[in-house]
Image (cartoon, rainbow, N blue to C red):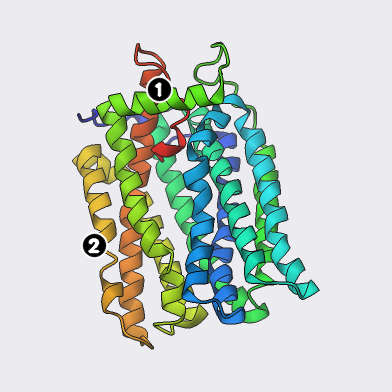
Amino acid sequence: MTLPRPRPSAREKAPDLGTGFRLYLGGESAGLVGTSVHLVALPALAVLELDATAGQAALLASLARLPTFLLALPAGGIVDRYAKRALMVRTDLAGAVVVTVVPVAALAGVLSMPVLYGVALGLGAVGVLHQAAAIAIVPQLVEPALLHRGNARVGAAFGAADTAGTYLGTAVVAAVGAAKAFWLDALSYLVSAWCAARIPDPGRPAAGKGRPQRWLAGEIWEGVAYTARTPLVRDVVLAPTLTGVGVGVSGALFAYYLLTALEAGPTGLGIVMGVSGAGALAGALAAPRIVARFGPGPTLLAGFATCPVAGVPLLFARPGPGPGWLAVLAAAGGLQLAAAAVAGTTQRSVSWGTSVLSHHSSLGPVKGVRVALY
């Protein structure tokens, strides 16, 4: 099944996405800058300062992703039940508290791998809930006709924030050390919370408002059942899920491999991650034109297929990579995240279009699986 291609209109050429959307974009971008900082600082701290083994590095990465597996479905139901703006503020404040544990533990002389495990697990849990609310609030801030353009704007801003945060994190880690870099992360969470708190009330009722509240488990089961029996939604869920599993497996040891086997150091890690973020920015900017020309189906297929192919150069890199190999690895990372950004912005728009249709048809709601759609 394919969706009709969007027709350009005068409003789409110069869209006014509103004050609420601009505050949302600024806050989420600030939060992502901080997240990008700790994505550099956390593995550098574990490997270079705490002498983490490969198993410990893999466990650290796995614990950061474990909440996604455990909380993705419940998060969708929670977001449907509570105010999304309030959830965003509270999760940002919780994230600020969690990340300050690292520099405080370092000052107290008790920093260890178990402390990092707890921080990774806590940040993962906070991130799942925050992302669920942040994704779900966008259609309440942007008119349906401008949703894909809004998603592309989100992807572009996030790509820029990711790149800036990565390079900033690399510089801060080199200048003051990995542990102190987490103070910057805490500040970014506070800025994000401040922006989220200032977002005006969207003033639109949540989908399904007025229906009697049921047990969360029942809503999750309803969403899973709906997904299983609806081909379009099932495919949109399974494709990124399977791709995410593969990327997660390789990503669990990506930073460790660069820092140890390839001896790239924090600067090399920062360069590769920074160029990758720039690729995400380019992909998000190009997404609307690509979808307009080729349609959402082929765009999703090409995007998901490119992700694993772009990881091949890492298999051939050798220890002590010079500027040439670092450039190759960075370019491959940029291509991978560009493809992911194109597919991701398209997927969000397709997913939300399907979700909206389901609330106005006999198919029923899709509560409980909304997070899985992204």
Q: Is residue 321 depicted above or below 163 in this figure?
A: below
- State how far apart marks 1 and 2 are (Cα): 34 Å
Circle 1: is it few (<14), some (14-19), or many (20+) Cα within 10 Å? Answer: some
Task: Give me the residue at 71% from left, 47% from top.
Answer: 93
Note whether residue 347 is visible: yes
Task: Please indicate whether residue 374 sits to the left or right of residue 166 in the image.
Answer: left
For residue 165, above or below residue 272: above
Q: Secondary structure at mark 1?
A: helix
Amino acid type of disc 2? Val
Q: Position of residue 272 (x, y in %)?
A: 41, 72
Q: Given the image, on which type of amino acid does mark 1 rest?
A: Val
Residue 295 in sight from this viewpoint: no
Name the image quarter holding residue 295. Answer: top left
The reply, left or right, for residue 120 in relation to residue 343 is right
> How many numbered circles does the render carry?
2
First along the sequence among labels 1 and 2:
2
Q: Residue furthest front?
A: 55
- Label ID, residue 295: none
The picture quadrant where one finds residue 14 is: top left
Q: Tell me the residue that label 2 is attached to.
A: 309
In the image, residue 136 above or below residue 92: above
In percent of width and height, residue 167 lies at 52, 70
Q: Which mark is residue 356?
A: 1
What residue is shown at x 60% (from left), y 21% (from top)? 203
- Residue beneath the point at 55% across and 55% down: 32
Of the two numbered discs 1 and 2 in the rendering, the one whose residue sits closer to the viewer: 2
Which element is circle 2 on?
helix
Mark 2: give few (<14), some (14-19) or many (20+) Cα within 10 Å: few
Residue 346 vertical placement versus 54 (above, below): above
Q: Is residue 277 left or right of residue 80?
A: left
Residue 305 x %, y %:
23, 53
